[in-house]
Image: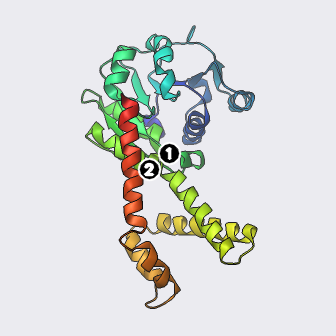
Amino acid sequence: MSGELPSSLVLLGAGKMGQAMLTGWLARGLEPSRITAIDPHLDESGRALLSQKGVRLTKTPEGVSIPEAMVLAIKPQTLESAAEGGRKLIGKDTLVLSILAGKRIADLASRLGVSTAIVRAMPNTPAAVARGISAAVAVPGITQRQHAIADALLSSIGGVEWVDDEALIDPVTAVSGSGPAYVFWLVECLAEAGAKAGLPPELSMRLARATVEGAGELMFRDKSTEASTLRRNVTSPGGTTAAALEVLMAKDGLSPLMERAVAAASRRARELAG
């Protein structure tokens, strides 16, 4: 798949997610000399990382050649100010890949002055360890090569799911984009519950973290088995797990709570889009 990577790439915004993607691209075989990062606010550790990897870093787009692909990894609220410089780097065949939460394709097109070759994607933070999941939607006019480039760039940091309807990106954001935070909160709650049951807090946290890590790895390695089946495999009739699940699966248990959480995140994503 390395042949589907772009001949040249501009990374507009080199924060945590931009750095995670960059690491994935380099691991996939994209030459550092083909990448230019533009970020006027990058901290010292970020600058050191890019320098170590041999990636050119500049504060402005001045002197940067028009690339085959430009990835927007800036903060969504800075799109207006960054668009002026970004517009200068978009040629007639440049792919624009955006990971800006809440910014729709129409927003990007109007601010960047381009209506074709735009892909909007929503990755998540496990991209930092190449275990992310991204959902992406492309404008109808994208070429086969541009689609392949976007897929290669996103698959460098984990799995990719393509959708046809941009409206699905809001619930995607609520499920997988924000989802890691839900899992981290689950670990916090599980560890606190263990401590209240009598475990030393440090031990309870270690047990909670290892349990979630292991369960996630089990699902990752056994993709053919449904999560519901994995759950039933752990649950002995009349046992301890069944007693706990009776609470979690009650009418006022985890399922309606998660529905409200995802609905709230989806609603907020629509609000951010303006």
- Residue 177 vertical placement versus 210 (above, below): above
| Residue drawn at x 35%, y 36% as measured from the top left | 270
Instruction: Identify which residue, 171 or 27, lies in the foreground.
Output: 171
> Is 132 on the left or on the right of 172, as rendered?
right
Number of callouts: 2
- Residue 266 vertical placement versus 256 (above, below): above
> Is 110 on the left or on the right of 54, as rendered?
left
- Going by the numbered disc 2, the residue's amino acid type is Ser
Q: Position of residue 50 (x, y in %)?
A: 68, 29
Q: Position of residue 45 (x, y in %)?
A: 74, 32
Q: Which residue is mark 1?
A: 124
| Residue drawn at x 64%, y 26% as measured from the top left | 55
Q: Quadrant of residue 268?
A: top left
Sequence-wise first label, 2 or 1 = 1
Contact, CB < 8 Å: mark 2 with mark 1? Answer: yes
Q: Secondary structure at mark 1?
A: loop
Residue with the most extreme top position: 62
Q: Position of residue 161 (x, y in %)?
A: 36, 47
| Residue drawn at x 45%, y 69% as measured from the top left | 222
Rendered-image quadrant of the N terminus:
top left
- Residue 144 vertical placement versus 239 (above, below): above
Q: Check residue 262 in the rendering and tell me which mark sits there, or answer none.
A: none
Q: Check residue 176 in the rendering and tell me which mark sits there, or answer none.
A: 2
Disc 2 to disc 1, C-alpha distance: 7 Å
- Going by the numbered disc 1, the residue's amino acid type is Asn
| Residue drawn at x 58%, y 35% as measured from the top left | 22
Q: Quadrant of residue 90?
A: top left
Does residue 1 show up? no
Q: Secondary structure at mark 2?
A: helix
> Is 235 on the left or on the right of 27, as rendered?
left
Instruction: Identify which residue, 195 or 134, lies in the foreground.
Output: 195
